Image (cartoon, rainbow, N blue to C red):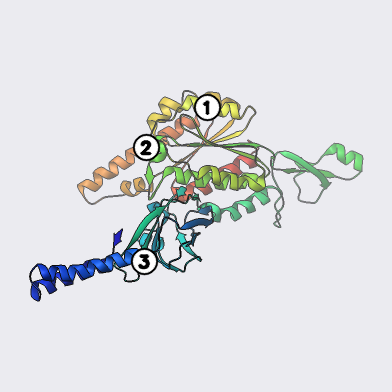
Amino acid sequence: MALTGRTALLAAIGALVVGLLLPGWSGILAVEGILLFGILYDLALAAPVRKLLITRTGDTSVRQGDAVEVHLTITNPANRLLRARLRDAWPPSSWQPGTEVAASRHRLTIPAGERRRVTTRLHPTRRGDRTADRITVRSLGPLGLAGRQGSHRVPWTVRVLPPFTSRKHLPSRLARLRELDGRTSLLVRGQGTEFDSLREYIPGDDTRSIDWRATARRGSVAVRTWRPERDRHILIVLDTGRTSAGRVGDAPRLDAAMDAALLLAVLAARAGDRVDLLAYDRRIRASVQGHHAKDILSALVNAMAPLEPELIESDAPGLVATVLQRAPHRSLVVLLTGLDAAPIEEGLLPVLPQLSRRHEVLIASVADPRIQELAEGRGTVDAVYAAAAAEQARNERLRTAQRLSRHGVTVIDAHPADIAPALADAYLALKAAGRL
């Protein structure tokens, strides 16, 4: 049984009537007896809620920041009119702050033997799987004083995918890729390290590209054309350990690393390279292997969606061993991790030579823009001390990057808004130099 606010209001008015006009037990019995009769009348005529048939339909995935609709179909099998208030409960992060009450509550009236559909509009603010909780239905009587209340569990899960905000950088990097591949309208010769074809010499061509044997056979000067390397293996490794949990702005470092990984993966797939993903801390958290270019983005976002940072120190030897097992032949290994001095010096540096001897290694790290802001602070004693601490932190990251570079590793340290395009540019530079 559930009582409404109307019942409480009438009870308060009845108390005033008893106190002012009908003091005594006779007045209490008269006033409260009428109210009790109204409550029992509503309970008798309210449609039962346990017998309701509820089903869900709608979308099962949405990109973070977008809206999605989930529909509830409620069937009333009873022979009484259903006047109901319904609450469709989801985790708080399924809505923008302050909109949960309006989005999750519905009013509906269903005649006997009929059905109605209501729509819950979700606007998730975090990645991951959002699972529906209970559906609570309160069936009211005709007077609106009381009713029956019950809950139903109708399972449904909406997977919230990474937003891929760095998608805006893709057209410019694809244009650069076409320029490298010689497919641009500009008068720029495509560069690369793989032989593509022979063509007639044109004044202005680099004379070092002349193929003298082909020239002798054809009787005219022929030059070689080149294209960037293709069908190379790119292994993107996400470190999901403790350092990836540090918040930069409103999101953990892992989210910025994912965004950079998505841009790199789409760019590399468009360039004809094979892209795999590995998420690791002390064990494999996610893995994507062997997907074609047309479905690599879908596979990656689905694998990344449920990933969360683990508050444990990453196992660097285990990570390197897993990478060597996944990539037995020469590959570009892109490790998205932190540049904190202790984890790098004690964990990664001792085993890094095993990786760099066989593969081209690129390490990318998300820097905190707040450090730069603090380093520029002046004017007060506290600001000066904060600036000194920030400068020390920046110098430690710089020294760590330099130690990694001595092992032949390319290091990128950029702010969340810059890490994705910086990583894409580094990939294009390696491709142009024939180092993949």
Pointer 3 residue: 45
Q: In the orientation shown, which residue stands out farthest toward the front? A: 26
Of circles 2 and 1, the one toward us is 1
Question: For this view, does 357 lie left or right of residue 404?
Answer: right
Checking the image for residue 320, the label placed there is 1
Q: Is residue 270 visible?
A: no
Question: What residue is shown at x 43% (from left), y 26% (from top)?
Answer: 347
Q: Identify which amino acid the numbered label 1 is placed on.
A: Val
**163 or 180: nearer the eye?**
163
Q: Label 2 sits on what residue type?
A: Asn
In the rendering, at what x and y percent does residue 405 appear?
50, 32
Please give the label number shown on residue 395. 2
Query: How much space separates mark 3 and mark 2, taking CA atoms?
Result: 75 Å
The answer to whether residue 317 of the structure is visible from this angle is yes
Amino acid type indicated by mark 3: Leu
Disc 3 to disc 2: CB gap under 8 Å: no
Give the answer, above or below, for where 89 lies relative to 8. Answer: above
Q: Earlier in the sequence, mark 2 or mark 1?
A: 1
Give the camera-side residue of 340 and 60: 60
